[in-house]
Amino acid sequence: MLLLITILIIAIICFIFKFRERLAFQYGRLSRPYDQATTTIALTRMGSDQFIELSFGKVHYIYHSSANSSSSSTLNIFVHGFSIAMEMWQDIFPSLVHDNQSCLVLDLYGRGWSDAPDVPMNVDLFVSQIAELLYALNLSYEKYNLYGVSMGGVIVQRFTELYPSKVSKLILCNSTGLDIVKPSFISSIPILGALLFKFDRQSGESKSVRAQWANPDSDEYKRCIKLYQQTCQQHPGFLRSLFSTIFYFDFHLAFKSIECIQKLSVPILILWGEKDTLTPVENAYRYHNLYKTSTLKIISGANHNLLIEHSKEAIEAIKTFLKDK
């Protein structure tokens, strides 16, 4: 009898651990305005919304092809970070499009308007998403300029490690990867950790989030919080994807990627906010030291969301870097 009770308890614990996310988070299909044939709602302010079915679900992207033959051999690819989707590039992307450069921006799985597959959200999932998207679109560019902000910095470095011959330039903005991120003990508790995470994150506003903005009273901050809250409402897999990323995203792979990239001759721009509270500015100098020939640009007064709050300075630094041979 005791043996049966022990087996039953072990089985229950294993069941709870295996399905802890399903027991805590909402599941269902993402409701998209584009699914309704009568609507022409623009999902972003960045261009014509496009969708494509890939191996792990439907992906939202925006692609602009350059009409200038001299710049048509290189494609600029923009990769966002942990929670704010492609809108993080809302000023940078249109600026390069205005310069008639070829550009591609996408929502990573579980963010924005892309599906949230029920798989571990690790770095190679996102790298494969980008690689498969490029293959599916049958884009014939010789080289890519890769832009990664925050968590996206780890993704583009991993992409460079795996596809070194395809990368022309790297732009790392407030990139994570140098500090190992581990889930808290409370977050690791089955069901309870997920429920607490859901309760804490669904409003989008917190002291730590406000601390990542130079001006948390701005209209841009309010717009991003509203966008986050709307995503929580419309996207059943959003919070689950964030929670999964905390557990499965391989931040430590950045060190392996760095070792590989150090052997390449890829020009790198390190763009950072002077007052970044999430990825301290000291990490910018660490990256600059690791990538000996990199270009370092520290934006005065900027915080972690510098691409939104200090977009003019960021655009100037990026365009200057792109012009350099």
Image: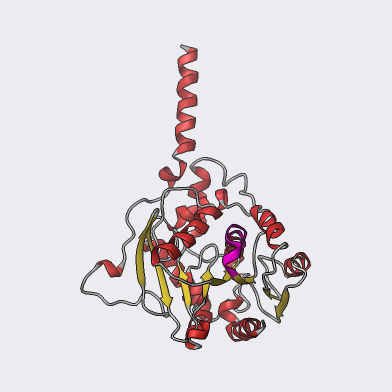
**Residue at horizontal 46%, vertical 35%?**
16
Which residues make up the magenta segment? 157-167
Q: Is residue 95 left or right of residue 49?
A: right
Residue 6 sits inside the magenta stretch: no
For residue 299, above or below residue 137: below
Tally of numbered discs: 0
Residue 163 sits inside the magenta stretch: yes
Q: Position of residue 167 (x, y in %)?
A: 59, 68
Magenta region, main secondary structure:
helix
Q: Quadrant of residue 147?
A: bottom right
**Residue at horizontal 48%, vertical 88%?**
98
Q: Position of residue 315 (x, y in %)?
A: 59, 84
**Residue at horizontal 72%, vertical 62%?**
263
Q: Position of residue 58 (x, y in %)?
A: 36, 60
For residue 54, above or below residue 294: above
Q: Is residue 243 left or right of residue 136?
A: right
The C terminus lies in which quarter of the figure?
A: bottom right
Q: Position of residue 11 (x, y in %)?
A: 46, 26
**Direction left: furthest residue:** 38
Residue 199 visible in the snapshot:
no
Residue 144 visible in the snapshot:
yes
Q: Is residue 284 left or right of residue 112?
A: right
Q: Is residue 227 left or right of residue 53?
A: right
* Camera-side residue of 293 and 79: 293
